[in-house]
Image (cartoon, rainbow, N blue to C red):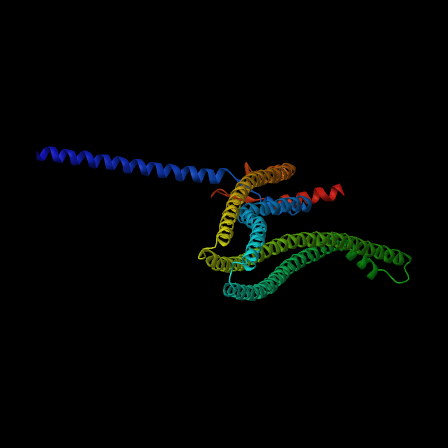
């Protein structure tokens, strides 16, 4: 028994040792492969977003498409709420029509009751007093409701203007910062160009100055040397001036583009804010109006119930007939209301389904447009990236850093080369 146990333990230990050795060898092999790859392969990365800034028209188109996609997604997100509001609004129209029918019929019934010869004077007086009381309550509720709506309108308008002002200031600051960066960049370019020009003619100017200092004022060549020096200096100034004018034009154009982009962004954002506040206002007004309508409806029901109770408790056949007409008519109006409600619900379910599919199709179409623009842009710059990669002796180039191995960022080199190509084509 002991021998078997010892033999079993020995086998287990041997298996563990073998596994550990295997893992150790694998780890050494991985380190070797990684070091070999790191030493033998150089990988380049390029930030296409930075390069995209050299193509403002393409960037603007992509930005516009992205905004439209965002708008469509927002519309899709709020679709249920939008359709619900439309359903409520249309339902309100039908409810008003039905209420008007009911009111007309109730007035007709009330007139029959009030002017009925079989109705005693005491009941008539009670009905008239009740009617005045109900009308007074409705008028008071109407005034309160109108005040609430005005207050909501005032608060929402104030909040909306504040938000719009904050958004405007935010975009203005961003735009100002972007313009300042552009101006600083152009100043740096002018200064660098100025230094380059001065460096080119430096030796020639120094030599001419030396010649002048070593030449007598009576020497006939002195004037010629001075003219030559003046010509070179003038050439320097002209080249610098030309660069300044060219840079200024580019800066003005860039500033106009920046302003256009931020103005467009502000328009889109402000439109969204206004739509949100309009929706919020409509929702609150609908809720307050519903409360008012419910209040009026409840009062009218109580009034009619009280009036009809007078008739129900009488033995007079004429009054009983009036009561039966009323209940039958109310039942018909309720059935009509339920039918309209059902039809509208079906209508808006279908509308929402169709709109949902349409929005999804539009989003997919916009996504394709965006992908095509990006693909076209990347295809246009691919030759430049290949040239830079060849110059740097790179085997692979990725659009972002996806590896821990040695990489070279060739974005700035690509930007420089594209600028050179653009300048040559002018």
> In the picture, residue 347 is in which quadrant?
top right
| View extreme (left): residue | 1
**Quarter placement of the N terminus:** top left
> In the picture, residue 354 is in which quadrant?
top right
Determine if residue 412 is in view: no
Q: Is residue 32 left or right of residue 166?
A: left
User: 105 or 22, which lies in front?
Assistant: 105
User: 370 or 89, which lies in front?
Assistant: 89
Q: Is residue 184 above or below residue 24?
A: below
**Quarter placement of the C terminus:** top right
Residue 276 x, y percent position in the rendering: 58, 55
User: 351 or 275, which lies in front?
Assistant: 351
> In the picture, residue 262 is in which quadrant?
bottom right
User: 321 or 25, which lies in front?
Assistant: 321
Residue at 55% across, 54% down = 109
Determine if residue 335 is in view: yes
Residue 146 x, y percent position in the rendering: 59, 64
Residue 291 x, y percent position in the rendering: 52, 59
Q: Is residue 232 left or right of residue 175?
A: right
Residue 215 x, y percent position in the rendering: 85, 60
């Amino acid at each position: 028994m002991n021998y078997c146990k010892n033999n079993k333990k020995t086998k287990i230990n041997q298996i563990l040792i073998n596994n550990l050795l295997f893992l150790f060898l694998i780890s050494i092999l991985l380190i070797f492969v990684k070091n070999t790859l790191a030493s033998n392969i150089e990988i380049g990365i390029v930030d296409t977003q930075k390069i995209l800034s050299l193509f403002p028209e393409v960037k603007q188109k992509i930005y516009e498409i992205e905004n439209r996609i965002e708008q469509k997604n927002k519309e899709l997100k709020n679709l249920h709420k939008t359709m619900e509001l439309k359903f409520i609004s249309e339902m309100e129209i039908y409810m008003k029509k039905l209420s008007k029918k009911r009111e007309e019929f109730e007035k007709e019934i009330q007139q029959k009751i009030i002017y009925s010869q079989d109705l005693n004077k005491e009941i008539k007086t009670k009905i008239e007093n009740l009617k005045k009381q109900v009308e007074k309550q409705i008028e008071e509720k109407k005034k309160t409701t109108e005040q609430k709506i005005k207050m909501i309108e005032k608060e929402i308008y104030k909040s909306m203007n504040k938000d719009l002002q904050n958004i405007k200031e935010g975009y203005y600051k961003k735009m100002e910062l972007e313009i300042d960066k552009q101006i600083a960049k152009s100043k740096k370019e002018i200064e660098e160009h100025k230094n380059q020009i001065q460096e080119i003619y430096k030796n020639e100017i120094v030599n001419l100055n030396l010649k002048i200092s070593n030449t007598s004022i009576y020497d006939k060549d002195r004037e010629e040397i001075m003219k030559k020096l003046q010509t070179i200096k003038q050439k320097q100034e002209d080249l610098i001036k030309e660069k300044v004018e060219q840079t200024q034009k580019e800066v003005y154009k860039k500033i106009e583009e920046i302003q256009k982009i931020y103005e467009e962004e502000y328009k889109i954002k402000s439109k969204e804010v206004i739509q949100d506040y309009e929706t919020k206002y409509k929702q609150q007004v609908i809720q307050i109006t519903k409360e008012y309508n419910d209040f009026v409806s409840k009062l009218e029901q109580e009034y009619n119930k009280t009036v009809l109770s007078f008739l129900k408790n009488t033995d007079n056949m004429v009054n009983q007939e009036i009561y039966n007409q009323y209940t039958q008519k109310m039942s018909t109006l309720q059935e009509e209301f339920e039918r309209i409600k059902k039809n509208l619900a079906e209508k808006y379910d279908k509308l929402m389904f169709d709109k949902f599919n349409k929005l999804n199709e539009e989003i997919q179409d916009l996504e394709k447009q965006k992908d095509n623009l990006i693909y076209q842009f990347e295809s246009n710059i691919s030759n430049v990236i290949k040239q830079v990669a060849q110059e740097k002796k790179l085997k692979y180039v990725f659009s972002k850093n996806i590896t821990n191995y040695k990489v070279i960022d060739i974005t700035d080199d690509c930007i420089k080369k594209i600028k050179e190509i653009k300048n040559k084509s002018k």
